[in-house]
Amino acid sequence: MLYKNIIRPFLFLFYAEKVHHFVRFCLNYFFLIPGTKFLIRCIYEVKDKRLEREVFGLKFSNPIGIAAGFDKDANMFNQLSHFGFGHIEIGTVTPKAQTGNPKPRLFRLPADNALINRMGFNNQGLYSAINNLKKRKTKAIIGANLGKNTLTPNEKAVDDYIELFDGLYNYADYFVVNVSCPNISDLHELQDQKYLELILNAVMDKNKKRPKQKPVLLKISPDLNNHQLDEVISVVQKTGIHGLIATNTSISREGLQTDSKKLEIIANGGLSGKPICKRSTEIISYLHQKSNGEIPIIAVGGIFSADDAIEKLNAGAVLVQVYTGFIYEGPAIAKKINKAILAKAKNTA
């Protein structure tokens, strides 16, 4: 209640991207205070063997994670892990640093419990991410979300993904090929089956030459139709990748309560939060059923509550991730979801 009634209204008075940087600054310095890590873990961490999940050959302490986009440069994952998350996905990382799209580029839609962003893969680049990941202290699973540089033409995109996989192999536990962000020019073309197979086969070829394969996943758009989802299943089966993340942000504005004039001013960008919750769940259910449950799926999209997370798990997801829900609901979101999962397990025992 403290977060939603006092802290969030105050933070929402300021431009969203500046608040994000402020939160990062506070986290980094707050955890320098002796005893802070222990205190935060005592408040937010839920430990129980029944929460543990083994997915892709990795052992997750619980099924709740933070989606890519929150810790773009891998400079918050150690601190975030103390809030009870079983995994944190860093990035999107590109080979070269890039500033992203012009500001303003991150917008809140409080009437819809949503965000619109057109960040454009702003990040400090591969070698900055590596240097930050070398400071890893957490035992939480770390994923790396990979994207091509904006100036890299699609016909050479595979080179970017290979460079990122090779560079981050020793520092991340799993990898996500991101070709579904709506905020990079022509990136959507890489969702074409031919491009996808080329990129994923190249990454998997590199993976198979390593002493130990690491999980490679594909993040998909909520705007795909059933035919395209069938193609996604075919791509997974042909390339041998280990799973999917469903879903990324949407270009749809259907059913929003936010004033249409405000939406016109915001213009382009990817929609996240409550408005895509239903579509994300539909896609997870479709993929799970059509693949006979053989493709592990990480769910993301509109998860604000324990009920939202459990709905995704019931639809066929093996893990869930939060992003917009974390911003709107606050740092206790993982604790609430994990407690609800335990309560459900107790009631069904």
Image (cartoon, rainbow, N blue to C red):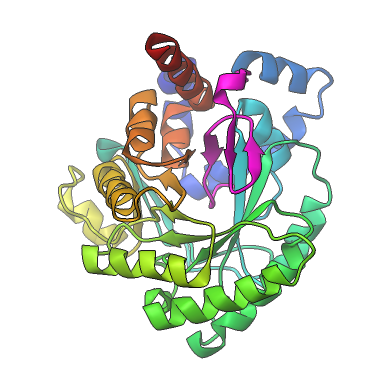
48 and 305: which is toward the camera: 48
* 44 relative to 295 in the view: left or right: right
Residue 154 image position (x, y, % from top left): 49, 85
* 153 relative to 144 in the view: left or right: left
Quadrant (top left, top right, bottom left, bottom right) of the N terminus: top left
Quadrant (top left, top right, bottom left, bottom right) of the C terminus: top left
204 and 248: which is toward the camera: 204
Q: Residue at x 59, y 28 (%)?
A: 52
In the figure, 126 relative to 30: above or below?
Answer: below
Residue 258 image position (x, y, % from top left): 21, 45
Camera sees residue 290: yes
Q: Is residue 69 magenta?
A: yes
Number of marks drawn:
0
Q: Residue at x 53, y 21 (%)?
A: 335
Camera sees residue 96: no
* 126 relative to 12 in the view: left or right: right
In the image, the segment drawn in magenta is 45-71
323 and 167: which is toward the camera: 167
207 and 333: which is toward the camera: 207
Residue 257 image position (x, y, % from top left): 17, 42
Residue 223 image position (x, y, % from top left): 27, 61
In the figure, 227 relative to 70: above or below?
Answer: below
Q: Residue at x 62, y 56 (%)?
A: 215
* 188 relative to 263 in the view: left or right: right
